[in-house]
Image (cartoon, rainbow, N blue to C red):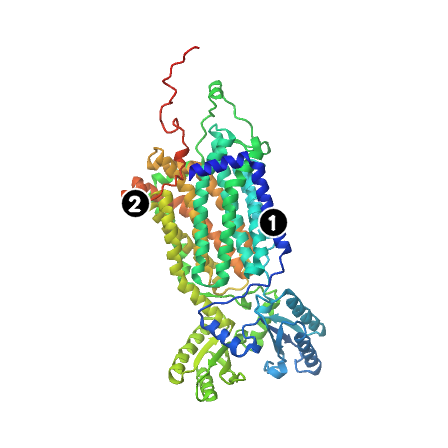
């Protein structure tokens, strides 16, 4: 592989005009495709195999006019102080608003008048109108949302407080200025790392081009492939981070090759042949982790994983081809390692006559990475214990992990959704924010109405039930719908327990009469999604870690090194999840990260972090340890190889980690709790993995293992392909220690 990538790097350097033209053409093509593509409706959301989805499908078939899984809005009215919503003026204003809501959009299925539906609080100060749409919240058009907001704005002019809750206002999350700050921090780190604006600009430029192609392609295909808005957010987050990192490693290796006196074209080829090999395998681990999300069998999550994996693949290809092309354009503006540009006060190092003749520089002082590696090699047990204890302490909150999906109660207090949530909770009770829908399939049951009434009575006798509506039947009389309002909030464990209790009673009903009773609604769907994600976590972890483990065996030609990498990853991801629990569930330092309301952790967070963090963790493992293996293969002792790996890789890996942390941390400023949580979780996970696991635990374990770390059974060694990540095939005879073939020849004058 190293030889092929070496040739690719040299070709890209020589044919830089052609390579640059191809990538600019692809960016233009993707941009034009995104601009000319029809406006995509938001992605539909379905969870095959869950009871809640099965109930929705049954209602869609038997009661299509109900739009059971359609978007909903709750327009909450609160009378001014000292007044009631039943006062004539207020009542007329509410009825007028409901009439306007019915005609506000073609997508509106129904809008219930509070005085007809009896959704007025006991004290008469609060009422709400339920609006149902014909399409799901993710398919609802912006025009319908705008019409909803305009109608409620008009209703406020009368002096009443009017707020809107429900999933109809679910909009595209925005990240604000913090995302730009993250990119700015990345730029500063690159300038400090390379000491040159030109060298620092290359990774940023190529990463932005890669993300531009990826996100534009997603936008162009969104309508055809039913891709949601969160798909491009994830692709941008991952693509930007890995795009900068991959380019950073190749530019850094290029500068190191220049420092050894190589010609620029040869240095570009060798950088792609060595660091590029690591980029390929690091990218493969990320792609495996993202594509593996398909195991969960949630279509939206699968699409997000595939789209982000495609963006990562683009980042790898750009790093292997466009970076050497741009290095060709940059010429001498990209300095060898150790030299800084004029901007940072860099000057050419003075050389002695002998040094000038030989091209050798004055030996450099040990850098911080070298000194740290030597310390770890001397004190491996202490470093190992300290690192494990620290990560273990951070992981302790995981024992109290509560999973769920955020509702309007997790929104910032300034939003209309949160205000509506609080008004309903105060006026009616918290359970009214997440009523359950019990659906009975009575086809073939002798006494359908009697059976539905029995189901209603059984549910009424359960704990945590506030109200139960009488059964409502479809026209055929074979399907009954019962609305159940819990006493507790939608995201509470009491509500989850109630759903399980109703389903337990449903099994008894089916055994006795043959009637199938199912619980659905937004709250029940959230519970089912959480359960589905929990059930898929172990199979997903086994698949992703297993495939990556096999891949790393090929890369490192070792059993213990990949095993150590996987165990280190588990430590870092558990510690990161612990930090997420502490901040978002317990509220520790919540105000610092803009967490206004604590609650359960998003149910997809564990499986999402396992997938993404594993891929990113293996990036640092591959980049750092391949340099150690390279030194070991070339004859250094195991301890010397660790120091050499840190000498060449620690600074760059640290810079890459800081950049990735900055990019992920930029998403903490998002208005959406889900995006905020993902940004924080990934940022803290990268911190733990890069600076504790890879920088401390990895060298400590390798120092303790010594030569055993690189052991591989001979039979397996013969079977595995030799991918030559270390670039052994690129070494000249002199570098391999062979004598100069021309050394023994005698000069003859002719």
Asked if labels 2 and 1 touch by Cβ distance under 8 angstroms, the answer is no
Query: From the viewer's perspective, is 83 left or right of 46?
Result: right
* Residue position for label 2: 716
| Above-or-below relation of 149 to 543 | below
Towards the viewer: 92 or 535: 535
Please tell me how many numbered marks the rendered image carries.
2
| Above-or-below relation of 560 to 328 | below
Residue 437 image offset from top left, x and y in percent? 50, 77
Q: Residues within 10 Å of mark 1 (few under 14, many from 20)?
A: some
Label 2 sits on a secondary structure element that is helix
**For the view shown, which residue lies furthest in the top direction?**
749
Which quadrant is the N terminus positioned in?
A: top left
Query: From the viewer's perspective, is 537 left or right of 596?
Result: left
| Above-or-below relation of 427 to 277 | below
Towards the viewer: 711 or 324: 324
* Residue position for label 1: 29
Which residue is painted at 27% across and 44% down in the image?
Answer: 715
**For the view shown, which residue lies furthest in the front direction?**
750
Could you say which disc has been placed on residue 668 in the image? none
Label 1 sits on a secondary structure element that is helix
Give the mark nearest the N terminus, 1 or 2: 1
Closer mark to the observer between disc 1 and disc 2: 1
What separation in Å lies between label 1 and label 2 (alpha carbons)?
46 Å
Residue 310 image offset from top left, x and y in percent? 51, 52
């Amino acid at each position: 592989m190293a030889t092929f990538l070496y040739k690719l790097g040299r070709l890209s350097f020589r044919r830089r005009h052609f390579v640059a033209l191809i990538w600019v053409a692809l960016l233009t093509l993707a941009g034009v495709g995104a601009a000319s593509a029809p406006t995509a409706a938001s992605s539909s959301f379905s969870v095959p195999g869950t009871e809640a989805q099965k109930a929705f499908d049954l209602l869609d078939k038997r009661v299509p006019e109900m739009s059971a899984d359609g978007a909903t809005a709750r327009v909450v009215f609160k009378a001014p102080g000292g007044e009631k919503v039943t006062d004539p003026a207020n009542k007329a204003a509410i009825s007028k608003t409901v009439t306007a809501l019915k005609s506000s959009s073609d997508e509106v299925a129904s809008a219930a008048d509070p005085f007809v539906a009896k959704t007025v609080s006991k004290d008469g100060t609060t009422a709400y109108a339920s609006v149902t749409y014909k399409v799901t919240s993710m398919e609802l058009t912006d025009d319908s949302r705008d019409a909803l907001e305009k109608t409620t704005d008009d209703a406020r002019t009368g002096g009443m407080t009017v707020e809107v809750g429900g999933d109809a206002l679910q909009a595209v999350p925005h990240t604000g200025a913090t995302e730009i700050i993250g990119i700015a921090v990345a730029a500063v780190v690159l300038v400090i790392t390379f000491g040159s604006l030109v060298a620092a600009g290359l990774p940023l430029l190529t990463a932005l081009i890669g993300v531009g192609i990826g996100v534009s392609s997603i936008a162009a295909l969104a309508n055809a492939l039913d891709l949601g808005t969160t798909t491009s957010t994830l692709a941008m987050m991952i693509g930007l981070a890995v795009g900068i990192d991959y380019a950073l490693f190749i530019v850094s290796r290029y500068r190191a090759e220049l420092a050894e006196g190589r010609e620029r074209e040869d240095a570009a080829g060798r950088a792609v042949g060595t660091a590029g090999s690591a980029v390929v395998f690091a990218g493969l681990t990320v792609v495996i982790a993202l594509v593996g999300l398909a195991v969960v069998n949630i279509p939206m999550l699968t699409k997000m994983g595939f789209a982000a994996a495609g963006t990562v693949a683009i980042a790898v290809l750009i790093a292997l081809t466009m970076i050497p092309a741009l290095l060709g354009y940059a010429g001498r503006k990209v300095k060898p390692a150790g030299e800084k540009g004029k901007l940072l006060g860099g000057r050419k190092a003075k050389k002695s006559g002998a040094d000038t003749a030989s091209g050798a520089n004055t030996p450099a002082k040990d850098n911080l990475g070298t000194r740290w590696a030597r310390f770890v090699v001397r004190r491996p047990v202490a470093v190992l214990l300290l690192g494990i204890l620290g990560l273990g302490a951070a992981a302790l909150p995981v024992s109290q992990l509560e999973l769920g999906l955020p509702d309007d109660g997790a929104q910032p207090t300034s939003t209309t959704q949160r205000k509506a949530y609080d008004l309903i909770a105060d006026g009616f009770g918290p359970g009214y924010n997440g009523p359950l829908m019990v659906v009975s399939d009575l086809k073939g049951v002798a006494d359908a109405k009697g059976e539905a009434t029995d189901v209603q009575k059984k549910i009424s006798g359960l704990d945590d039930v506030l109200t139960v509506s009488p059964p409502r039947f479809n026209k055929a009389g074979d399907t009954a719908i019962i609305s159940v309002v819990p006493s507790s909030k939608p995201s509470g464990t009491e509500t989850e327990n109630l759903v399980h209790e109703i389903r337990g009673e449903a099994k008894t009903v089916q055994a006795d009469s043959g009637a199938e009773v199912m619980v659905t609604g937004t709250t029940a769907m959230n519970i089912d999604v959480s359960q589905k994600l929990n059930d898929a976590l172990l199979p997903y972890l086994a698949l992703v870690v297993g495939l990556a483990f096999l891949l790393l065996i090929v890369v490192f030609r070792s059993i213990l090194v990949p095993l150590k990498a996987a165990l280190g990853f588990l430590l870092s991801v558990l510690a990161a999840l612990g930090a997420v629990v502490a901040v978002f569930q317990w509220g520790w330092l919540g105000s610092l990260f803009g967490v206004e309301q604590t609650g359960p952790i998003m149910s997809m967070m564990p499986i999402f972090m396992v997938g993404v963090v594993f891929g990113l963790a293996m990036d640092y493992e591959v980049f750092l340890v391949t340099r150690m293996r390279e030194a070991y293969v070339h004859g250094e002792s195991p301890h010397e190889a660790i120091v050499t790996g840190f000498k060449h890789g620690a600074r760059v890996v640290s810079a890459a980690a800081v950049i990735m942390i900055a990019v992920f941390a930029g998403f903490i400023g998002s208005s959406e709790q889900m995006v905020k949580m993902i940004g924080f979780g990934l940022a803290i996970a990268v911190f733990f993995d890069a600076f504790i696991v890879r920088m401390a635990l990895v060298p400590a374990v390798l120092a303790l293992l010594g030569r055993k770390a690189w052991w591989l059974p001979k039979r397996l060694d013969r079977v595995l392909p030799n991918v030559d990540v270390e670039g052994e095939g690129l070494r000249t005879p002199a570098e391999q220690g062979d004598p100069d073939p021309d050394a023994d020849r005698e000069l003859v004058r002719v």
